[in-house]
Image (tube, grey):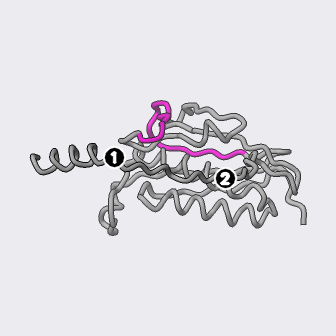
Amino acid sequence: MSVPAGAASCLRLAATGSAAGCARRHVRHLLRWWRLDHVAHLAELVAGELVLAGTPASGYAVGDVGYQALVGVGWVTLWVELQPGQLLVETWDRDASPPRITCPGDSGAPGLYFVPMLADRWNYYTPSTGGKITWCELRIPPAGERPLPHRRPTAIVRRSAMTTFDSVLLRRVRDRLVDY
């Protein structure tokens, strides 16, 4: 079975802590159905991050969420579309401000870290209906070609630790610890 270009999927998710995981699972199953397993891990990562970045902007519900807490929660919408030679992944959230770009160790609201690194192209725009759409394109390599470069394993050289015995130094350390 060959999946034609233009095949698409749309998933609307409540802006909760489970939204990113649901998005990743949806993309994994969708790409398996489209027989694109070789790019599924990359598409899962990107889709999960796009959804995660959009959840706080849409009225994020924290913790174990009961039915009553979901009444005021907004939505994040995920679109995945197969185009000739590429996969388009888009999310909509209700905040029109630009997506936040994060670095390792950043605290605060989640943002985009992997998307700028892994996508061939990405951006956002504000539709006339409000909110913002953040999108990215992922190239679909031919089957058998790896979508990401992989490091080659190198030999690990283990060096023995040098040990020295300096009785004067040890006495000074002991004395300082006792005085402390």
Dot 2: within a 10 Å radius of its alpha carbon, few (fewer than 14), some, or many (20 or more) residues? few
Q: Residue pushed farthest left?
A: 179
Q: Return the x and y of residue 119 as percentages of the image width and height.
A: 68, 40
Side (left or right) of 104 relative to 150: left
Relative height, residue 40 to residue 132 (above, below): below
Side (left or right) of 12 relative to 140: left
Q: Which residue is mark 2?
A: 156
Residue kind at label 1, given as amino acid type: Asp
Quarter location, residue 136: top right
- Say the numbered circle drawn on residue 166: 1
Q: Magenta stretch: dominant SS?
A: loop
The numbered mark, 2 or 1, whose residue comes first in the sequence reads 2
Label 2's element? loop
Q: Residue at x 63, y 56 (%)?
A: 44
- Say the numbered circle drawn on residue 94: none
Q: Residue pushed farthest front?
A: 167
Residue kind at label 2, given as amino acid type: Ile
Q: Return the x and y of residue 148 as percentages of the image width and height.
A: 74, 47
Label 1's element? loop
Q: Residue at x 58, y 51 (%)?
A: 159
- Please tell me whether residue 70 belongs to the stretch shown in magenta: no
Relative height, residue 38 to residue 148 (above, below): below
Q: Return the x and y of residue 59 as percentages of the image width and height.
A: 37, 49
Side (left or right) of 85 relative to 91: right
Q: Residue at x 35, y 56 (%)?
A: 61
Q: Return the x and y of residue 92 as percentages of the image width and height.
A: 54, 44
Which quarter of the rendering shows the N terminus? bottom right
Taking depth in this image into account, of 119 and 96 the one nearest to the observer is: 119
User: Which residues lie in the magenta part?
Assistant: 88-105
Disc 2/disc 1 C-alpha distance (Å): 30 Å
